[in-house]
């Protein structure tokens, strides 16, 4: 019987061997694919096991973390959620992350390898890294002024520091509280459904993700192209432009809001926003130079990141002369984000240099050591300095005595351009009110802020929609906040 | 051998100077090591979870230590020649099980199982001491073969009168307690098989008609075997308990082979097993579901229904990797309601890694090996078959449940010996170890004063 007992024990040994081999298969060979199976919640649990890093505005956090004691332990909280939502985005356990929460997720969640003291440190210690913080370039006062100015109306504000490209304000209205989406409860799901169904689209980031026809504010670009190309050499020389202007090759007649635009000088046409003069000017400059200038400012650039991506502002390059005429006054297929128009104003303000806008000053470890700075940003000379100087003069004129007097600030030089963009089929929609501007304190060496404001107020009486009336006061308050006046 | 006097004189020859070492001191040392390891695990869980040594650590260590010492004393008094390994292994596995259950309790504040498991373990050790103290000779059990099988059948059929729990009818609930009678039936069946086969092994091996190359026994001898086979499939269908039927059948085939030495029995057994499993797997929806899960563990994920228990278990093992996440630092609670019972091995795999899992497998293997060794050392067939049977129960159970949760074979709702939460199982396994101690004591004491086996 002993022989058979030995055989039976051999059978048991075989079973043991099978178990060991199979365990090695599961735990070593297949482990990677099991770990990365989307249904495996472990990665998610680890992600929320420590408090998320904070996003800071002006040195103090606008975010926080709350210990829920649940499986997904830490939830995101927001101070002034609606105010900063277009910058922070949300960090939801159910719906992922957006905007800075998304773009800087590695730092905020602690997975960024730069956060660790040594390469592969986390892999060796098997611990997630401590989350880092993100310091933004935002100016708290400017952000608040912009939000207050929009007062719940549909619209957006973008403000940039011209000399650096630092984004000082990024506001979208109406807004929402991202804290509502942080958790994984039924309340979060309900908020998600409600926000997505809301016809006002509160989660749309109108400052960077929505393009509008820029209307007359685009005349800054057209004027820059005309001056750079030498089509106009003297701001005060009369132009040869009829009123109304028949679009080349068509019978369509372009008119102006006011009278007295015929043959106006560039200065007068700019101050009073003459469509006829600028439409003809665009055609005179030609599609080639118009395109070069517009793309220099950042139009048609699909790769823009601040660090989250912005919607592409467009200037149509395959146009006939009639379309070019309309494109040159910010209509037809010309579309721009508020951020893009702020960049236009900033380039004018900084002697024709465009500093790529950015929102993250630097990222730091919990102790405060810098992980990554904003680094050198590309600087582009988008027009001749003389052209920029001429445009500054034109824009100051608009605020001093033109359509933009509402933006004037005592003790500061302000340049601006109004816009009232027609849109909808047969221009049936309520026009958008635009204002782009920059401001320089009288003691300052250079302009400190460039702003673009768009208000798409569906409730206003059509006749009262105007860049000067609706948008300029908002821009003024933002600029005052930056200039501290 | 020409001198007949020498042959006669041999029994009177003085015993050699070498006495068989009893090795009780080694047993004591190993028990203390097992208790220390368990307490260390308990502290490790507390440190990982709360950053502090859990307040109950001293009490837990003292409780486990006193239990183990009592068992050791019983062995020292009544089974002094017993194998020194089975008891420390049982203490370590039981202690580790308590640690894992306590660790999982932390995730489910409403359902604490560790205290109950400690009570059951105490009962189990009590039964162990009772068996070691009262059962002077395992051969007494041979007389109760038919009482055993009747009791086993009664225990097996009892749960079918009670409502199903989680799809299987293997529990009976009395008051707040639920008992799994099938667990106790295992030991009784092992006793019956050993006694029946010890009595009938010649008839099974050498009588009956010969068909082609196989020698078939007469119907009178074959009857009980077929009955057992039908019974095991019957249990499966009635109670939806794939594991128990597999265990009974495997146990029976192994013992039949060991008793008769006929490879043909293995072939017949395997054939019947495959036929039975195939038929039931096709026809019985609960079992069929288990087989489908085994073949396609991620089907529910692909269907958008989320991971099932088996895929969660595989995720847990994978998360452990080679060295494990560390006690208290895994997430095997994701497996769900059976995490403390059927799937407790997944927690071990996740938090102790492949290294810890292999160590646990080797502990079981060592326990099984000591059982087989005792069987080899004994001379009478009943004791041999009993030892092999008890050891095989452990081996088969470990294989079936560990293979199930790691995706090697279809999943069955069985309990990992000593490790899993479940009172009946812990008590039964302590009884198994007690019988192994008793058998090994007999096996080794017969050599006392002579050459060691």
Image: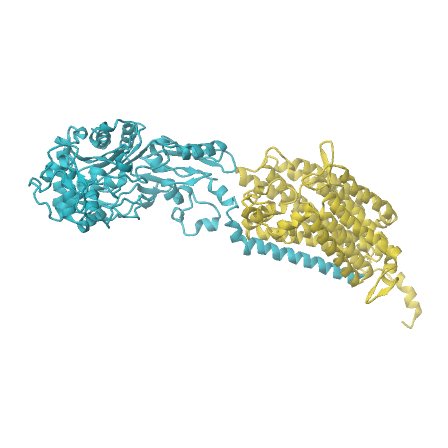
Chain colours: A cyan, B yellow
Looking at the image, residue A206 sits to the left or right of residue A276; the answer is right
Looking at the image, residue A301 sits to the left or right of residue B319; the answer is left
Viewer-proximal residue among A348 and B55: A348
Viewer-proximal residue among A53 and B257: B257
**Residue at the image position 69 percent from the left and 45 percent from the top:** B418
Quadrant for the N terminus of chain B in the image: bottom right
Tell me, yes or no, if residue B29 can be seen here.
no
Tell me, yes or no, if residue B102 can be seen here.
yes
Looking at the image, residue B327 sits to the left or right of residue B85; the answer is left
**Residue at the image position 31 percent from the left and 31 percent from the top:** A154
The part of the image, by quadrant, that contains residue A460 is top left
Q: Is residue A143 above or below residue A235?
A: above
Looking at the image, residue B276 sits to the left or right of residue A305; the answer is right
Q: Position of residue A283 (x, y in %)?
A: 16, 46
Quadrant for the C terminus of chain B in the image: bottom right
Viewer-proximal residue among A177 and A137: A177
Q: Position of residue A231 (x, y in %)?
A: 11, 47
Q: Is residue A398 above or below residue B224?
A: above
Q: Position of residue A123 (x, y in %)?
A: 46, 50
């Amino acid at each position: 019987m002993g022989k058979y007992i030995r055989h039976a024990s051999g059978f048991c040994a075989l079973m043991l061997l099978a178990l060991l081999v199979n365990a090695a298969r599961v735990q070593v060979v297949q482990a990677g694919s099991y770990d990365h199976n989307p249904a495996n919640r472990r990665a998610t649990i680890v992600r929320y096991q420590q408090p998320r890093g904070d996003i800071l505005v002006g040195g103090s956090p606008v975010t926080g973390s709350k210990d829920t004691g649940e499986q997904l332990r830490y939830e995101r909280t927001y101070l002034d959620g609606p105010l900063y939502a277009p910058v922070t985005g949300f960090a939801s356990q159910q719906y992922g992350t957006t905007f800075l929460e998304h773009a800087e997720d590695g730092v905020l969640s602690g997975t960024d390898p730069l956060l660790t003291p040594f390469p592969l440190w986390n892999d060796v210690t098997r611990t997630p890294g401590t989350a880092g913080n993100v310091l933004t370039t935002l100016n708290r006062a400017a952000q608040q002024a912009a939000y207050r100015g929009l007062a719940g109306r549909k619209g957006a504000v973008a403000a940039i520091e011209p000399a650096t490209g630092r984004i000082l304000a990024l506001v979208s209205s109406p807004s929402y509280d991202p804290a509502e989406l942080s958790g994984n409860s039924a309340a979060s799901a309900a908020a998600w459904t409600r926000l997505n169904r809301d016809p006002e689209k509160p989660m749309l980031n109108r400052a960077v993700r929505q393009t509008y026809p820029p209307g007359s504010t685009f005349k800054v670009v057209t004027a820059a192209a005309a001056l750079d190309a030498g089509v106009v050499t003297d701001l005060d020389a009369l132009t040869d432009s009829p009123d109304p202007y028949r679009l080349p090759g068509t019978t369509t007649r372009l008119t102006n809001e006011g009278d007295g635009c015929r043959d106006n000088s560039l200065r007068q046409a700019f101050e009073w926003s003459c469509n006829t003069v600028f439409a003809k000017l665009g055609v005179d400059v030609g599609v080639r130079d118009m395109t070069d200038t517009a793309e220099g400012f950042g139009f048609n650039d699909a790769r823009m990141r601040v660090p989250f991506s912005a919607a592409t502002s467009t200037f149509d390059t395959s146009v006939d002369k009639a379309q070019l005429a309309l494109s040159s006054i910010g209509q037809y297929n010309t579309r721009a984000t508020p951020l893009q128009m702020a960049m236009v104003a900033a380039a004018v303000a900084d002697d024709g240099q465009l500093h790529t806008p950015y929102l993250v000053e630097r990222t730091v470890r919990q102790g405060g050591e810098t992980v990554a700075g904003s680094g050198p940003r590309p600087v582009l000379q988008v027009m001749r300095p003389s052209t920029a100087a001429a445009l500054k003069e034109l824009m100051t004129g608009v605020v001093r005595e033109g359509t933009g007097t509402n933006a004037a600030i005592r003790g500061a030089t302000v340049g601006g351009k109004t816009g009232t963009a027609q849109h909808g089929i047969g221009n049936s929609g309520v026009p958008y009110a635009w204002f782009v501007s920059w401001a320089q304190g009288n003691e300052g060496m250079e302009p400190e802020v460039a702003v673009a404001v768009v208000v798409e107020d569906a409730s206003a009486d059509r006749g009262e929609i105007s860049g000067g009336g609706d948008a300029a006061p908002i821009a003024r308050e933002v600029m005052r906040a930056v200039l501290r006046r | 051998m020409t001198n007949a006097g020498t042959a006669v004189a041999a029994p009177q020859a003085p015993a050699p100077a070498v006495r068989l070492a009893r090795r009780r001191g080694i047993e004591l040392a190993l028990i203390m090591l097992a208790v220390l390891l368990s307490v260390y695990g308990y502290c490790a869980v507390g440190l990982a979870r709360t950053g502090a040594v859990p307040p109950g650590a001293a009490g837990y260590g003292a409780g486990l230590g006193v239990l183990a010492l009592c068992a050791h004393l019983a062995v020292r008094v009544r089974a002094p020649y017993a194998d020194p390994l089975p008891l420390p292994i049982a203490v370590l596995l039981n202690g580790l099980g308590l640690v894992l259950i306590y660790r999982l309790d932390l995730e489910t504040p409403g359902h604490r199982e560790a205290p109950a498991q400690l009570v059951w373990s105490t009962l189990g050790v009590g039964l162990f001491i009772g068996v070691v103290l009262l059962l002077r000779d395992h051969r007494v059990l041979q007389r109760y073969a038919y009482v055993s099988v009747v009791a086993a059948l009664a225990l097996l059929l009892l749960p079918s009168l009670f409502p199903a729990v989680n799809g299987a009818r293997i529990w009976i609930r009395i008051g707040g307690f639920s008992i799994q009678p099938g667990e106790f039936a295992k030991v009784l069946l092992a006793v019956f098989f050993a006694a029946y086969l010890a009595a009938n092994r010649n008839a099974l091996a050498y009588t009956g008609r010969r068909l082609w190359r196989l020698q078939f026994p007469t119907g009178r001898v074959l009857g009980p075997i077929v009955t057992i086979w039908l019974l095991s499939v019957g249990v499966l269908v009635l109670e939806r308990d794939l594991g128990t039927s597999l265990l009974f059948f495997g146990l029976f085939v192994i013992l039949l082979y060991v008793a008769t030495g006929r490879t043909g029995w293995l072939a017949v057994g395997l054939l019947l097993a495959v036929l039975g499993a195939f038929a039931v797997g096709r026809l019985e929806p609960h079992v069929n579901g288990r087989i489908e899960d085994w073949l396609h563990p991620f089907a529910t994920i692909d269907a958008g229904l989320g991971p099932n228990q088996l895929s969660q278990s595989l995720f847990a093992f994978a998360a452990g990797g080679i060295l494990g996440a560390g006690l208290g630092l895994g997430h095997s609670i994701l497996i769900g309601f059976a995490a403390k019972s059927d799937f407790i091995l997944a927690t071990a795999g996740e938090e102790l890694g492949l290294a810890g899992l292999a160590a646990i497998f080797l502990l079981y293997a060592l326990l099984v090996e000591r059982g087989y060794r005792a069987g080899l050392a004994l001379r009478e067939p009943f004791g041999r078959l009993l030892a092999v049977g008890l050891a095989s129960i452990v081996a088969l159970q470990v294989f079936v449940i560990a293979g199930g949760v790691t995706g090697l074979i279809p999943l069955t709702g069985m309990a990992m010996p000593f490790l899993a939460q479940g009172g009946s199982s812990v008590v039964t396994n302590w009884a198994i170890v007690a019988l192994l101690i008793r058998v090994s004591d007999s096996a080794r004491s017969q050599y006392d004063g002579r050459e060691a086996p």
